Image (spheres, helix red, strand yellow):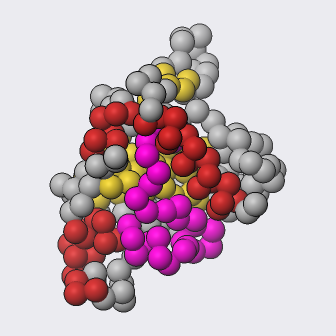
Amino acid sequence: MNLRSLVLSTVACLALVACTDDEQHTTSSGSTGSGETPAEHVDLFACTAPPTCGPIYNHLGAEPASERECAARLIADGTPGSIYAEYTVSGAVGRAAFIVVLGDGTALVQEREEECTPGDCGTTSPVVWKASGPQRVCDVLGDDELEAACADGSTEGCFWDPWNYSGQDFENLGNCKEVEERGCEEVAGLVGAK
């Protein structure tokens, strides 16, 4: 089983549990170093329905093209849905984002990082992830350009992924602000999960 199949299987399996479970799954955000109890976050990776688009893998370029186009059309059409994206550079800490496109030019975003020592990252299978971070709402950048690029079924320029080339920051999401955590059922309702 390749990594993509493993990720899809895991997301689908966890989504099935979440959609049939009224509990809100939470994760610890890790040690604060100050002796305080870490905050707990609703884990979108574990409790949402399978993503509408993705996974999109970014390692020296985002792929597959079909999922980047799916994400672009979702954003250009203003349709609520979800996107799963990973950024990995050999030996560097991998990152993942679960992005819930809200259809109003914004998205609910949650990130997590690989649990590893820099230099040894990307060597475990399956990937071990740190606890998910807080939920944030971000502006989706470039949606006007996508609308034109994706018009009339065109595929030229009709692609989207969240990362910049270094993978350290979002390129196509901006003005992110932490928000009150949304539960599994609420997020499933936002994307029209059945």
| Residue found at x 36% / y 89% | 156
Q: How many marks?
A: 0
Span shown in magenta: 45-71
Q: Kindly indicate the quadrant of the structure image that contains residue 180.
A: top left
Left or right: 114 as drawn, with respect to 176: right
Measured along the vertical axis of the image, is residue 160 above or below residue 184? Answer: below
Residue at image coords 28%, 86%: 153
72 left or right of 27? Answer: left
Instruction: Locate residue 1: give its quadrant.
Output: bottom right
| Residue 92 versus residue 187 in the image, above or below | below
Instruction: Examine the rendering and report whether any part of residue 114 can be seen.
Output: yes
**Is 52 contained in the magenta span?**
yes
**In percent of the image, x 35 and y 80: which residue is there?**
158
Q: Position of residue 78 (x, y in %)?
A: 21, 63
Query: Where 5 sits versus 138, above or below?
Result: below
Residue beneath the point at 36% across and 86% down: 155
Residue 118 seen by the camera:
no
Q: Which percent across, then down, holds residue 175? A: 29, 49
Residue 56 point in image, percent of width and height? 52, 65
Left/right placement of residue 114 relative to residue 153 reads: right
Question: Looking at the picture, does residue 49 appear above or below residue 86?
Answer: above
Residues 51 and 158: in front is 51
Decide which of 99, 1 is in the foreground and name it: 1
Q: Position of residue 38 (x, y in %)?
A: 53, 18
As for residue 143 lying within the magenta part, the answer is no
